[in-house]
Amino acid sequence: MAEQAATTATTRTGTTSVGIDIADLKPGLGDSVHDSQRIFRSLLEIMARPGKVIDLEHDLDVPAPLDVASAAALLTLCDQDTPLWLDWIADTPPLRAYFAFHCGVPLVERSQDAAFALVSDPSNMPRFALFAQGLDQYPDRSATLVIQTESLNEGLQVMLSGPGIPEKVSLRAAGLPEWFWNDWRLNAAQFPLGVDLFLTAGRSIVGLPRTVVVET
Amino acid sequence: MYVAVKGGEEAILNAHKLIAEERRGDTVLPELSLDQIKEQMQLAVDRVMTEGSLYDRDLAALAIKQAQGDLVEAIFLLRAYRTTLARFGETQPIDTAKMAVRRRISAAYKDLPGGQVLGPSYDYTHRLLDFALAAEEGVGAPQATVAKEAVDEDMPRVTDILNHEGLIEEEIACDDDGPVADLTRDPMEFPADRDMRLQNLARGDEGFLLALGYSTQRGYGRNHPFAGEIRLGEVAVEFVPEELGFAIEIGEVTVTECQMINQFAGSAERPPQFTRGYGLAFGHCERKTMAMALVDRALRARELDESIEYPAQDEEFVLYHSDNVEASGFVQHLKLPHYVDFQSELQLIRSLRRRHDEDHLEAAE
Amino acid sequence: MQKSENQIPAAPETDEGYNFAYLDEQTKRMIRRCILKAVAVPGYQVPFGGREMPLPYGWGTGGMQVTASIIGLDDTLKVIDQGADDTTNAVNIRRFFARTAAVDTTEVTDEASIVQTRHRVPEDPMTEDQILVYQVPQPEPLRSLEPREIECRKMHAYKEYGLMQVSLYEDIARFGEIATSYSYPVMVNDRYLMSPTPIPKFDNPKMDGFPALQLFGAGREKRIYAIPPYTKVKSLDFDDHPFQIQQWEQNCALCGAEETFLDEVILDDRGGKMYVCSDSHFCARRREEGHSGSLPDSAAAAYAAAVGAQEQAVRGEREQ
């Protein structure tokens, strides 16, 4: 499957079979057709214009520890064809049930098997190299990481350049691990392979495709 | 002023009214009913279901009526409808060994367990126009003779019989637990595995496969095929609902299956043995399944270590050009305006022409 | 995006039996994921599970699937074919989305949030608030030189584009110039060789550093690719044979425009012809602004009426 992480075989065995108690579930997108279309357009906009921060307008009551923006992105993009990896804080029965119910998404244990990954605790996240990087002939088969940060208007300022950016644009993100931007350089250096990121904080979300060159 | 390509919504809508008129034909005559098409043009319905990838006789009949009998257009109509349907799950593989056989022949053995069952077939008709069919009163209610004995329930497939002796390759089942390729959801990928190839051929244009299969018989592919078996009949379709955990029968489908047996000299890893080519279609589509089986075998050249020299062995060539919905669309898209490109080419040709004429002038001087 | 009287409101009755914008949600999600990856790897062709559309392959099914996956109720759609809003296929595709997605449509480039095109980039500049969707018949720039998908895919993986360079150079050796006038290959972001679809090479320079996102959909070949805004797009050339666009000795006979792509219109069977803008909206706007070309005003009006009459009539009916 083109859009999927390279390893499909494990996705079936990784499927969650948690019992779902609908009464405890937080709701998904209210109007799945039009909400997901609007959210997708925001995701497309920020992926096409790296560094541009968008505040999603959608009212979503999300389970902890999800941000509104990370939940909206995952509900919009994930389904039974996209293995999802949850980090250790997010990997809880309620969250498993939330994604299983709203997306039918198979959850995977190993980060490298995931098409999408949710990182709610960036300070303890795996390095980028531990996610699917894509293949020489199919660089699209790489993971998309949704990383929840403390803030997208505080923190270390970095300058971004590359496709989608007229000259340069600045970005601040708080709560990222020390190695983050250095690893990002390695990620960008292996273009066309590499992971793509969405960084979120509350309703705010910004896109970082692998083409982005970062100066700290 | 002549303006060929401009046209508005009104022109389009009127074109639709014109085809509706042509489709209806002379209104003095009664309109065709879907039941008539379904019952009296069964082979057309079968082809449309097969290449349209949807087992629904009523919808296939509707598509044939709507397309004025243009089967490729009918196939397209069915495909475009099919793609909007919700997907509930995957059935169990059908078991053709358990088919309620109506026709079963083998060219490889004179007699075999279960016997030869000729069944409905045009094979031995004399192709003389039957003017009785043209008579106003029609043909009444023709009735075939019922055999004295029922067809043997145990009718093993010929390839299974050969299997006992180890003279034919084992059918190497792909990983049964792994997902089966599905062209209706995922794009083709090369090199293509046999599951994807067979699905492509099953949906492929009968005429295209017929010509390719024929080419292998004429030396463009060296297949040495025998029609091991062709069978036609009804098979059960089973589905395992998640909440039950075991298979239940949800209906039956009519299918035609062809197993070709082909010579194979052996390779470094394999002993000399027969190899297989496989064809399957909805309804009664013998020509299609036989051609499909020939092409399937030819496409296995890579896995059998044969040299790939001929069109029928070239998987990119075959699989990319077999689909008549794609082919028909792209060939006919040449009807769309291309005047921007043509203008570009005009300019280029004029420029090249100027240069050419100048060069010749210089040469002459 | 300001709304204006030029906009045609969505048809009041849309087809209830079908999904919004025809495609089911799962298909849209799959295509949306592919679009995001296409944006992340500019110029690379992402394989996608293309669906049968109710229009034939080759008639814009790829562009339609991309448009169907991005379009929403807030959008205003413009569809052009050969630069014109009123060619049959453009009319038909616009009609499809008005029926299935209940979106407003327009012929005015700067009023559209999405422009779907076949074979042209509009003459009017596009902005950051817009998306340009191309219909792509053959996404593989190497296909005419190497028909095999397996081989082409390797060449892209290893950035092995010598075959293309040699082919262009052979043109120069043989004809004295590069004999490609449309589908002229480009390098995107210095990495991927890309087919700009059969736009005339006249439009190639517009793609470079384009403010709007450009998306490409090939339905039959099942590929999606993209050029993010402000991305380097370079037409292949040689130091001693730099890339050049087409030029005309004439101006547009209707609006007098000097630097647009012109269509040749045959006037009689004695070699009479005139040239008019291929971008029908651009030309009409200029005429409204008072520009005129060599054709007498009365003749220009007659011509415009002849080619635009039906569309005007339809619009008139809708407004009533």
Image (spheres, helix red, strand yellow):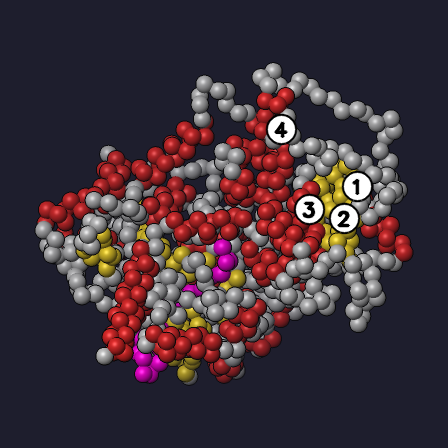
**Position of residue B287 in the picture relative to residue A189 (left or right):** right
| Mark 3 vs mark 4, CA separation in Å | 26 Å
Q: Which residue is mark 4?
A: B129
| Mark positioned earlier in the residue sequence (2 or 4) | 4
**Position of residue B16 in the picture relative to residue C152 (left or right):** left
Q: In the picture shown, does residue B89 fall above or below C141?
A: above
| Mark 3 vs mark 1, CA separation in Å | 14 Å
Q: Chain of mark 3?
A: B
**Residue type highlighted by circle 2:** Ala
| Mark positioned earlier in the residue sequence (3 or 4) | 4
Q: In the picture shown, does residue A155 fall above or below C278?
A: below
**Position of residue B340 in the picture relative to residue C306 (left or right):** right
Question: Could you classify mark 3 by the number of other residues whose Cα lies within 10 Å: few (under 14), some (14-19), or many (20 or more)?
Answer: many
Q: State yes or no: discs 1 and 2 in contact (Cβ < 8 Å).
A: yes
Q: Residue at x 73, y 35 (%)?
A: B124
| Mark positioned earlier in the residue sequence (2 or 3) | 2
Q: State yes or no: discs 2 and 4 in contact (Cβ < 8 Å).
A: no
Q: Quadrant of residue B358?
A: bottom left
Instruction: Say which mark, if any, is on residue B105.
Output: 1
Q: Residue at x 55, y 66 (%)?
A: C148
**Which span is picked out in magenta?**
C220-243
- Element type at marker 3? helix
Q: Which residue is mark 3?
A: B289
| Mark 1 vs mark 2, CA separation in Å | 9 Å
Q: Which residue is mark 2?
A: B227
| Mark 1 vs mark 4, CA separation in Å | 26 Å
Q: In the picture shown, does residue C283 fall above or below B53?
A: below
- Element type at marker 1? strand
**Residue type highlighted by circle 4:** Leu
Majority secondary structure of magenta residues:
loop
